[in-house]
Image (spheres, helix red, strand yellow):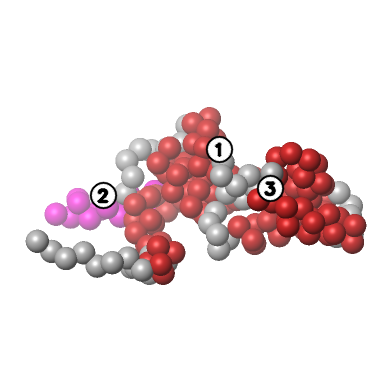
């Protein structure tokens, strides 16, 4: 019987194999998926696009719905939704807020809005959905409005890139098998 090594708190946060190796694994997993290049690309693009939205906790579900509507692979959508993670969410939210603020013609977060957001942040564990949601609605709606064009752009770029990569990978594999 083999001994199992105890899992440290760091192992729960950071993959033991390292992030680079983990991303290479995901890349190979996507390239080797069965299904048409459109299905794989639409699935990955759907997951990546919804990861841009500030709807935390709904990314996988929304990615699956969008993949279903675009006839994409549901597994590829789940992998694409990993584009949004704790390392990238702050960047996506900041970009969405900045773009949304620009689209609304604003000049950034007002001091009054910053004070409300700071006050609500201190109360978050005590019931966000009640009256506090009304207080953060201006910031949330601005971020959501700015995130929508980013999500569309992410979908288009991811779709074209993944479809091209899957097509290239499959052509190389077919040529390699033909030589044998």
Q: Identify residue for label 3.
A: 126
N-terminal of the pair, mark 1 or mark 3, is 1
User: Of tags 1 and 3, which is closer to the observer?
Assistant: 3
User: Of tags 2 and 1, which is closer to the observer?
Assistant: 1
Q: Identify residue for label 2.
A: 174
Q: Secondary structure at mark 2?
A: helix
Dot label at residue 62: 1
Which residue is painted at 89% across and 52% down in the image?
Answer: 105
Q: Secondary structure at mark 3?
A: helix
Out of 92 and 176, give the one closest to the viewer: 92
Report the span colored magenta. Answer: 167-180
N-terminal of the pair, mark 2 or mark 3, is 3
Dot label at residue 168: none
**Does the magenta-highlighted stretch encompass residue 158?**
no
Tell me the crowding category of disc 2: few under 14, some 14 to 19, or many 20 or more residues within 10 angstroms, Cα based.
few
Regarding residue 41, the answer to whether it shows in the image is no
**Which quarter of the rendered picture does the N terminus lie within?**
bottom left
User: Of tags 2 and 3, which is closer to the observer?
Assistant: 3
Residue 89 position within the rendered picture, expressed as x and y whole percent measured from the top left: 60, 57
**Does the magenta-highlighted stretch encompass residue 177?**
yes
In the displayed structure, 179 sits above or below 9; it is: above
Which residue is painted at 63% across and 44% down in the image?
Answer: 55
Residue 147 position within the rendered picture, expressed as x and y whole percent measured from the top left: 69, 49
- Position of 153 compared to 122: left or right? left
Looking at the image, the residue that sits furthest to the left is: 1
Which residue is painted at 26% across and 49% down in the image?
Answer: 174
């Amino acid at each position: 019987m083999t001994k199992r090594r105890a899992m440290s708190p760091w192992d729960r946060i950071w993959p033991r194999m390292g992030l680079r190796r983990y991303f290479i694994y995901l890349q190979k997993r996507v390239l080797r998926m069965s299904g048409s290049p459109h299905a794989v690309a639409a699935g990955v693009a759907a997951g990546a696009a919804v990861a841009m939205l500030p709807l935390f906790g709904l990314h996988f579900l929304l990615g699956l719905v969008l993949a279903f509507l675009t006839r994409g692979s549901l597994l590829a959508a789940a992998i694409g939704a990993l584009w949004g993670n704790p390392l990238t969410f702050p960047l996506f939210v900041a970009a969405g807020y900045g773009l949304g603020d620009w689209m609304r013609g604003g000049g950034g977060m007002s001091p009054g809005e910053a004070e409300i957001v700071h006050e609500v942040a201190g109360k978050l564990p005590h019931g966000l959905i009640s009256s506090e949601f009304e207080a953060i609605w201006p910031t949330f709606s601005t971020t959501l409005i700015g995130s929508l064009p980013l999500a569309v752009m992410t979908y288009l770029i991811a779709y074209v890139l993944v479809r091209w990569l899957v097509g290239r990978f499959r052509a190389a594999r077919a040529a390699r098998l033909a030589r044998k």
